[in-house]
Image (tube, rainbow, N blue to C red):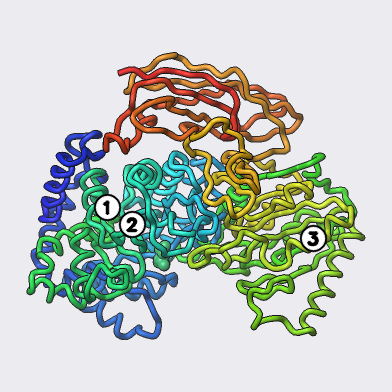
Amino acid sequence: MGMRRVMATVSVCLVAVLAASPAQQRAAAVAPSLPNDPAATKFVDDLMKKMTMEERLGQMEQIAWSGRERQANEGHVRKGEVGSFLNITDAATIARLQHFAVDESRLHIPIIFGFDVIHGFRTIYPIPLAMASSWDPAMVTASQAMAAKEASSVGINWTFAPMADIARDPRWGRIMEGAGEDPFLGAAIAAAQVKGFQGDKIGEAGRILACAKHFAGYGAADGGRDYDSSNISDEQLWNVYLPPFHAAVQAGAGSVMSAYEDLNGVPATGNKWLLHDVLRSTWGFNGFVVSDWDAVKNLQTHGLAASPEDAAARAATAGVDMEMTSHTYRDTLAAGLKDGSITMAAIDTAVRDILMIKYRLGLFDHPYADPAHYTSEILTPEQHAAARLAANRSAILLRNEGGLLPLKKTIGSIALIGPMVDSASDIMGSWSLAGLPQDSVTVLQGLKNKLGPSVTINYTKGVTIDRKQPSIFDEQFPDQKMTLETKQVRDAEFTKAIDMVKRSDVAVLVLGEAHNMSGERASRETLNLPGEQEQLLEAAVATGKPVALVLLNGRPLDILWASQHVPAILEAWYPGSEGGNAVADLLFGDANPGGKLTVTWPRTVGQVPTYYAQNLTQIPDDMTGRYWDGLSSPLYVFGYGLSYSTFTVDDLKTDAASVKTTGTIQVSVDLHNTSGVTGDDVVQIYTHQQAGSASRPRRELKGFQRVHLNAGETRTVTIPLKVSDLGFWSPANHSWAVEPGTFDLWAGDSSAATLHAGFTVTR
Ligand code: BGC
């Protein structure tokens, strides 16, 4: 056991005395998250005996590949002083560097190649927020397994995913990269992704190592501003922000990324409590931790570290094994060892963590991708089919007045309007780094593929959108005000679009955000449709023609007007390479929408942050009492989504009225497809603890199942409710427990479910 682990154990014992942490409530001795492997341990111990300090620090170093520094980087590799590269996607370069490491370096230690395979590699799957909206963990696992297959075929060993950050503020651009607002669903989706990337065990062929990021609390940035501090109470941290990470670790994630932000005043990357006490000692994590990009050096920016050397020592001591991109470990840790700011034991622990994962991955035996697979796994028909299925299952039908959708293939003409209708890069969304526009199907192309020449498609953009582009309605960027000439061109385009609507049978407006408007560094202070899209939508509706709105976006937007005036709204998110085909499937009923919101959709940005699992604090619980100038209810609740089928849920039953804290209750309902259309609904169960040591959310998701029902079919759906899932970290007791008492139970197909029952939990 390295010194760091010893210290961690000691510190956990102290925590136990001062405030019983989950370590103490859950288990006396925490099992390692990855199974012990004596052969690996012996191999790594033997190897480490031979390693110089430079080789040790090399393993702790991750370099962002840059062609410009090629020679210098190659030199480092040949000397065995690079543990990892990120951002190389080219099989030949990966193989060349790996050969230098394995053939030419003194100890032949292979490199681990990392890349952000977030929602696909070359074939782009729907963004993670979309995939979570499927409420279908099996599909999520299958999609990430397909992504792993492509990425591993070129030699990538490691993805920086899943993002397990809970996000309750749609201003934060990275909400698109996670599973939404809920810890229970977030945990299920994070675990599903880990399984998809890694398979059942690290080192399976055709898989890659997962990395749960950004540990932790990054999604709670003040004001939704990316990289800003997060101030999260202990109660929220334990009960809301940490569970998806814990689930990823329990699912066997081999790595974790430390986050950029200050968490309650201590930057996550220098936060020993997080990285030692919680991650390792409490959860038993025995993979390795990588910092986020430059996050070690940034400890100085945060005002935690006095110098790069201090930053390196603090991060390494806190538990960051590998430094991404800034080079403070390589440049200063040897000096730190001499002056006592870092111990040899801490360095050895980090190196051992990394080498153990390289061993588990099988890199020492199989360092290279098979050249026969370089291209044969890429963009295969199976990849396209899986991406299309994922996009179909991820879309959410938000509104469908008068059954406007699905459209009939026999219509004569469609006006297909919007700035992204034919944009191959926007349909992929952010974090599609290796995806190529030429491999994606736009909405225009998808509709052409579906309809052939028999339906006239009248297509134009209507408006253009760009990040920070000035709008004629927008006084925010006066220095960029458009010229009169530009305005005339834009007015003409707007008029052309509306004329097309007037002369078509139906209009489909494809609006939202360009791909770079959400994602990292893409926070927003409004949730408006950017540019003049709202005006375009209103003008289209004013023609009196039936209008369907398709949204391509990465966050809930302010669509209050649309929710009242546009008959049909389909949330397609950024659906990926097959997005255009999927949107066509959904619009024309070849796929039936079955996705549900995993984020509460606010009416206006002023309601943010808003989430369904709030505490009930005042009666009457009316939604008009909180803001005098608006409702406090959301536009669409968590768990909401329509279908071309109609469903009812009834006959809520439990198999016991009373259950022990260690037990499970079987909750069942009858789900009826009351329509003539086959489709999917998601049965959801929610609980509420009526009284206890602390107030608890008015509702919390505790089980769900996506169910496929034929037209007219009824099925009894049984969902196990594990009483251990009712446990929570009590801010009154500073401890984790299932508290005996009375619980409400609701079942239905959204968080507004009305079927109600109750049960008691006894010791
Ligand atoms: C992001 C990470 C990402 C890393 C490497 C950072 O800026 O925050 O999520 O994995 O870059 O690309």
Binning the other alpha carbons within 10 Å of mark 1 as few (below 14), some (14 to 19) or many (20 upward) gives many
Q: Is mark 2 within 8 Å of ligand 1?
A: no
**Mark 2 lies on residue:** 263
Measure the alpha-carbon separation of dots 1 and 2: 9 Å
Q: Which residue is mark 3?
A: 416
Q: Nearer the viewer, mark 3 or mark 1?
A: 1
Q: Residue furthest right?
A: 503
Instruction: Name the residue rendered at 12%, 52% in the picture.
Output: 7
Residue 14 in the image: above or below residue 212: above
* Pick the front one: 521 or 161: 521
The outermost residue toward the front is: 628
| Image marks 1 and 2: residues in contact by CB distance under 8 Å | yes
Residue 408, placed above or below residue 336: above
Q: Is residue 343 above or below residue 742?
A: below
Q: Nearer the viewer, mark 3 or mark 2?
A: 2
Residue 622 image position (x, y, % from top left): 61, 34
Residue type pointed to by label 1 = Leu
Residue 481: give x, y in percent of width and height.
69, 81
